[in-house]
Amino acid sequence: MIMLMNLSIILIIIANIFMLLASILSKKSLMDREKCSPFECGFDPKSLARIPFSLHFFLITVIFLIFDVEIALIFPIIPLFKMVNFFIWTKISMFFMLMLLIGLFHEWNQNMLNWIN
């Protein structure tokens, strides 16, 4: 028990030494206004934060993220081909693809895939 306490104390001391060295050796510039500001993604940090943002661009981004996640969900279907019967695999695959197509047609009917308003 005492050995465990000694080891934990040594580890805490080593961690504190590393944090102290990192804070001393880090190059912090107080004059760098971009690094000190909350926006680091292309916005001007000293301008008005409530600028108009294209809602259409946001919705296209959300559609991309949804289909990106759905593509990631397709990957486990491939190894499933060796584990189950071919007809069961076909039914699962077709059901998933049908769900993707229904979502795509719905977005098409809502005119969400038009790039130009």
Image (cartoon, rainbow, N blue to C red):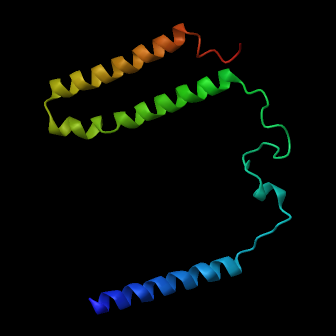
Q: Which of the pair 98/57 is nearer the observer?
A: 57
Q: Name which residue lies at 32% across and 23% down.
A: 96
Task: Determine which quarter of the picture holds residue 21.
Answer: bottom right
Name the side, left or right, on which 17 lies relative to 39. Answer: left
Q: Which of the pair 69/26 is nearer the observer?
A: 26
Residue 66 is situated, as x and y percent measured from the top left of the image, at 48, 29
Query: Which quadrant would the C terminus be assigned to in this image?
Result: top right
Query: Which quadrant would the N terminus be assigned to in this image?
Result: bottom left
Residue 19 is situated, as x and y percent measured from the top left of the image, at 59, 78
Q: How many marks?
A: 0
Name the side, left or right, on which 104 lies relative to 39. Answer: left
Q: Which of the pair 8/117 is nearer the observer?
A: 8
Name the side, left or right, on which 103 lies relative to 32. Answer: left
Name the side, left or right, on which 96 lies relative to 21. Answer: left
Task: Determine which quarter of the picture holds residue 83.
Answer: top left
Residue 50 is situated, as x and y percent measured from the top left of the image, at 78, 32
Q: Name which residue lies at 78% across and 42% down.
A: 43
Q: Name which residue lies at 53% across and 25% down.
A: 63
Vertical comparison of 66 with 43: above or below: above
Task: Determine which quarter of the picture holds residue 94.
Answer: top left
Q: Name which residue lies at 47% across and 11% down.
A: 106
- Residue that protrudes farthest toward the top in the picture: 109
Vertical comparison of 92 with 113: above or below: below
